[in-house]
Image (cartoon, rainbow, N blue to C red):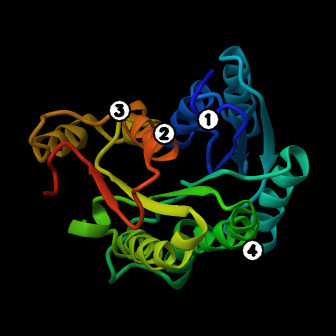
Amino acid sequence: MGRLEGQAAVVTGSSRGLGRAIALELARQGAIVVINYRRAETEAREVAARVEELGARCVVVQADVSEAEQARQLISAAIDRFGRVDVLVNNAGITRDRTLRKMTGSDWLEVIDNNLNSAYYCTSAAVPGMIEQKYGRIINISSFVAQAGNFGQANYAASKAGLIGFTKAAALELARYNVTMNVVAPGFLATDMVERIPEDVRAQMKQRIPLGRLGEPDEVAKLVAFLATDGDYITGAEFNINGGVHL
């Protein structure tokens, strides 16, 4: 039996990339996984098939978590289906990279809505049930860009830095109910999005990383799973997993 046997885990943005890796790792730990997607239904169904191959249960739920009502419906769907939410991973996120001179109001708001507001919407919907059952594990996915900045990513950096502050404040409020909240800040990862970047740009990225390579989504997923399974005395903490690109 896995360490999360019988627990229900919601992973936002889990049809691809890091979210996919997290959903699969939690399934390996025995969790019932709620796979969330906004548009990529085919990919989400493929993740579900892989979860079932691992012997775990899952359900696929379409929801744009940047919209308050849809985010709350996602959590409601999990509770209606499985009776509870034990683990929430706020992973959904987008980029709209432009310098400040060229960034539009839409570029700014879309990133804030998808990366930061979505975490608030999902967390605020899941917390009442977690408080009632006196158990919950919330993990927010930030980025080293929140800590170090990155050219052309003022909107992304602001959204991911907001997640760090949100995590620390909420962790103080929720600790009395045995609900922990932590934040994971990955560096550059070998995801489909990064693989689409020109090779010369990827080479420059690797040169910035002391360990000399991109991180694997599975490496981050294992850290998330650790916080869900063994992080009972960890809350309000920030975990860097970035190959040394920001120390």
Tell me the SS state at disc 4: helix
Tell me which numbered mark, 1 or 2, is placed earlier along the sequence. Answer: 1
Q: Assess disc 2: are there few (<14), some (14-19) or many (≥20) residues with their C-alpha within 10 Å of its C-alpha.
A: many
Q: Residue furthest right?
A: 80
Q: Amino acid at mark 1?
A: Leu
User: Residue 225's mark?
Assistant: 2
CA gap, disc 4 to disc 2?
26 Å
Would you place residue 85 above or below residue 53 in this image?
below
| Pointers 4 and 3 in contact (C-beta within 8 Å) | no
User: Residue 216's mark?
Assistant: 3
For residue 216, side relative to residue 204 (left or right): right
| Pointers 1 and 2 in contact (C-beta within 8 Å) | yes
- The mark closer to the camera, 1 or 2, is 1
Would you place residue 219 above or below residue 224 in this image?
above
Residue at the spot 39% in from the left edge and 41% down from the top edge: 223
Expressed as whole percent of the image width and height from the top left, the position of residue 76 reads 84, 60
